Image (tube, grey):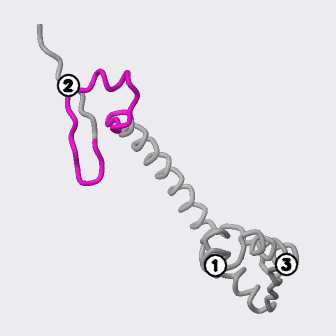
Amino acid sequence: MATRRHFTQEYKDQAVSLVLDSGRSIAEVAKSIGVHEMTLGKWVKKARESGRVPDKDLSEPERAELERLRKENATLRMERDFAKKVIMPAGAGTRDRMRIGAVVRSRRRCFLVPRARKKV
């Protein structure tokens, strides 16, 4: 039978500050300190509700940086999606395999390259 662990308030406060100050997710911090993520999530929620952790509004430079990063993220997602359409992975569907002329192998992945069309 498992025994229930007890944590000091100081330990809980340090764990909560790890989540809020480092920008890491609750799951990451919980795994690194050996606590279940639901437990840590409850600690964070309780700290926010009790007012020990003030909710900060973003300053004007932080808001501008957040907006810039969101735009950059959207651009990178579009580039990634385009690259996925251009370079088909080796596990592509059967319709795609019929149009493939050669297989190019790199160190990490195998890419399919469309065959050149013959001029008539």
Is 104 included in the stretch rendered in magenta?
yes
Tell me which amino acid carries mark 1: Asp
Tell me which residue sits at (38%, 24%) in the image. 94
Q: Is residue 119 found left or right of 49 in the rendered image? A: left
- Label placed on residue 115: 2
Q: Please tell me which of labels 2 and 1 falls first in the chain.
A: 1
Q: Which residue is mark 3?
A: 51
- Cβ–Cβ below 8 Å for labels 2 and 3? no
- Cβ–Cβ below 8 Å for labels 1 and 3? no
Tell me which residue sits at (45%, 46%) in the image. 75
SS label for mark 2? loop
Tell me which amino acid carries mark 3: Gly
Q: Please tell me which of labels 1 and 3 falls first in the chain.
A: 1
Q: Position of residue 77 (x, y in %)?
A: 46, 45
Q: Nearer the viewer, mark 2 or mark 1?
A: 2
Give, as a single range, the part of the protein colored magenta.
Answer: 85-110
- Label placed on residue 21: 1
